[in-house]
Amino acid sequence: MERMRTVAFQTVGRAVGFAGLAILCVMAGFAFDPLLAVQSGGVLVLLVLAVLLFKARMALTADHRQTEMWLYLDKHEKPPEAYAHWAAATVLRDAYLWFARWMAAIAVALWGMAVLMPLFGIGHVDPFAPQPTG
């Protein structure tokens, strides 16, 4: 069971890591407007959070033999079939919810920054406005 848990956290963590990399790339693309970058990051992190919560719910009913975690387990590491669905669903659900908690914390931090930035004079930037010279 512990090996299943380790593999579940590795597979879910890798997927969340790639999503985080994509979010950072979008935020870097909006570097000309820091407020827009933080807001877009907040929206995208909430989207990842929603997907993780959906996947956590679906882990209870999904076929455990079709998961990436199950494919990474060696034959001797897989539990007996009578116990396998419960074990796989439990560890996958735990992994999804653990990463969902972190995504929720990151979303709160990003949206907190988005609320505070205008208070410090950091607002939206119009990239097409004429720039002052000299």
Image (cartoon, grey):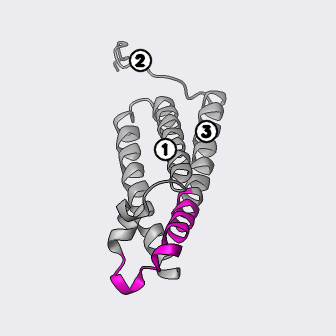
Residue 126: mark: 2
Q: Residue at x 51, y 34 (%)?
A: 43
Q: Nearer the viewer, residue 8 or 33?
A: 8
Q: Nearer the viewer, mark 2 or mark 1?
A: 1
Type of residue at label 2? Asp
Q: Tell me which corner region of the image, top left, top right, bottom left or bottom right, holds residue 119.
A: top right
Question: Any magenta on residue 79?
Answer: yes
Q: In x, y percent, where is residue 58? A: 51, 50
Q: Tell me which corner region of the image, top left, top right, bottom left or bottom right, holds residue 49.
A: top right
In the image, the segment drawn in magenta is 73-96
Q: In x, y percent, where is residue 121? A: 60, 27
Q: Which residue is mark 3?
A: 113
- Would you place residue 18 above or below residue 116 in this image? below
Labels 3 and 1: the sequence-earlier one? 1
Residue 51: mark: 1
Q: In x, y percent, where is residue 27? A: 41, 39
Sort mark 1 into few (<14), some (14-19) or many (20+) by Cα contacts within 10 Å.
some
